[in-house]
Image (cartoon, rainbow, N blue to C red):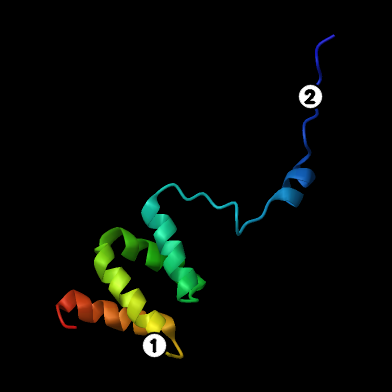
Amino acid sequence: MADQTVIPTIGDILKKFNPLEDKYISREFQSYGIYLAETLDDYKHKALYIRLAKTVPRAVLEKALSFVKDANARSRARLFMWKMAQLRKGKE
């Protein structure tokens, strides 16, 4: 007789599935975009931060993020976007 393997049911698979941790991130910029969204407490706009991580130079993003971390603002995401725009224009 051949070995019979137990095939898990769909219910068993769904019980183990965690949508927050089981997302497929294959590129470094995607990971950094998620990091930005979590740091800025703006997970709702994670796709925007992933796109920024892909297209904007990392130095600009790091400077803007460091500026936001040091500031005490109500909207960290809004302050980040403002500072990033200033840095991209060449103003500091």
- Give me the residue at 38% from left, 84% from top: 70
The relative height of residue 33 versus residue 82 in the rendered view (above or below) is above
Residue 68 picture location, percent across and down: 37, 81
Residue type at mark 1? Ala
Q: Nearer the viewer, mark 1 or mark 2?
A: 1
Q: Is residue 53 left or right of residue 13?
A: left
Q: Circle 2 sits on which residue?
A: 5
In which quadrant is the N terminus drawn? Answer: top right
Q: Quadrant of residue 58?
A: bottom left
- SS state under label 2: loop
Instruction: Compare marks 1 and 2 and give the one earlier in the sequence.
Output: 2
What is the distance, in whole Å, between disc 1 and disc 2 at their CAs?
Answer: 57 Å
Residue type at mark 2? Thr
Q: Is residue 46 left or right of residue 64?
A: right
Mark 2: few/some/many CA within 10 Å (<14, 14-19, 20+): few
- Give me the residue at 42% from left, 68% from top: 36
Check residue 14 in the rendering and tell me which mark sits there, or answer none.
none
In which quadrant is the C terminus drawn? Answer: bottom left
Q: Quadrant of residue 4?
A: top right
- Give me the residue at 36% from left, 84% from top: 79
- SS state under label 1: loop
Residue 18 picture location, percent across and down: 66, 55
Look at the image and tell me whether residue 78 can be seen: no
Look at the image and tell me whether residue 23 can be seen: yes
Residue 46 picture location, percent across and down: 45, 67
Q: Circle 1 sits on which residue?
A: 71
- Give me the residue at 48% from left, 75% from top: 42
